Each structure stands twice: as structure tokens, then as C-alpha cells.
Amino acid sequence: MSQAKKMLLSTAFVAMGLSASAFAQTAQPAADASGQISAQAAQAAPAAQAAPAPQNLVAPASTDPLVQKRNASAQASAEYKASKKASKQELKATTKEAKAQYKEQVRNAKINKKADNQTANDDLKAAEPITPKDTGLQH
């Protein structure tokens, strides 16, 4: 049992050591960047005593390929979403226009059908002689 405990403890210490070294490696560029920014600020301060120059605080681009891939993926995703949203709005506008045009065509077709029926009915009544429909004959 004590041997298993020792192995578990040693594994835990090794894991903590690895994570600490990984953290130190990722924290190092940020410390270098802040040191560079403060050095630039110190050089710029004596040059402009009256008005301090505006500074753009920009984090340096990471050289880690996984971070670059993540950033590129995020940018591509944002572009895709914007494109998809624009396409969806365009489709919505096109559909709305087509629907309005269809409704107008249906409305016109109904009016034309009504007018054609009325014309045909008037023509039929005009061509038919005026006689009683029931002649009184029974079969």
C-alpha cells in the first residue's frame, strides 16, 4: 500500500511540476511584453513633457501554431456567421418580395376569372331567347 501511495504522490508532483513549467512558459512572453511597453513608455516620457503621447497597448502575436490556428478559426467562424446572417436576410427579403408578387397575381387572377364569368354569363343571357323555362310538360 505504501508503495502505491508513493507512486501516486510522485505522479502528482510530476504533474504539478509539468503544469508549472507550462504556465511559466506561457507567462513569460506577457512579462516580456509588459517590460517592453514600460521601457517604451519611459523613453517616450522625457521626449514629450507637455502632453503624453497616446499609446496603443497591443499584445504581441503568439508564435504558437495552436494559438494561431485557434485565432484563425475564430476569425473564419465570425466571417462565416456574418456571411450567413447577410444571406439569410437577403433570402428573407427575396421570399417576401416573391410572396407579395404571388399574392398580387392570385388577386388579379381572381378578378379576371370573376370578370370572365360575368362576361360569359351576360353573353349567354343575350343569345338565349326569352321564353319560359317550364313548358308544363311532364314525363
Image: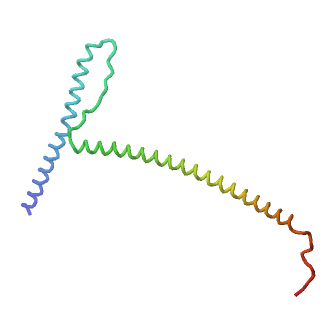
Q: Is residue 55 above or below residue 9?
A: above
Residue 51, by quadrant, is top left
- Residue 99 is situated, as x and y percent measured from the top left of the image, at 59, 53
**Label total for image:** 0
Q: Is residue 111 left or right of residue 7?
A: right
- Residue 26 is situated, as x and y percent measured from the top left of the image, at 20, 40
Taking depth in this image into account, of 27 and 17 the one nearest to the observer is 27
- Residue 72 is situated, as x and y percent measured from the top left of the image, at 29, 43
Q: Residue at 32%, 18% (x, y): give it.
A: 53
Q: Is residue 42 above or below residue 18?
A: above
Q: Is residue 138 left or right of residue 13?
A: right
Residue at the outermost bottom position: 139
Where the N terminus falls, by quadrant? bottom left
Taking depth in this image into account, of 110 and 77 the one nearest to the observer is 110
Q: Residue at 19%, 42% (x, y): give it.
A: 23
Where the C terminus falls, by quadrant? bottom right
Taking depth in this image into account, of 86 and 134 the one nearest to the observer is 134
Q: Residue at 90%, 86% (x, y): give it.
A: 138
- Residue 136 is situated, as x and y percent measured from the top left of the image, at 93, 81
Residue at the outermost top position: 50
Colour style of the rendered protein structure: rainbow
Q: Residue at 31%, 45% (x, y): give it.
A: 73
Q: Is residue 77 above or below residue 136?
A: above
Q: Is residue 133 above or below residue 79?
A: below
Residue at the outermost left position: 3
Taking depth in this image into account, of 76 and 44 the one nearest to the observer is 76
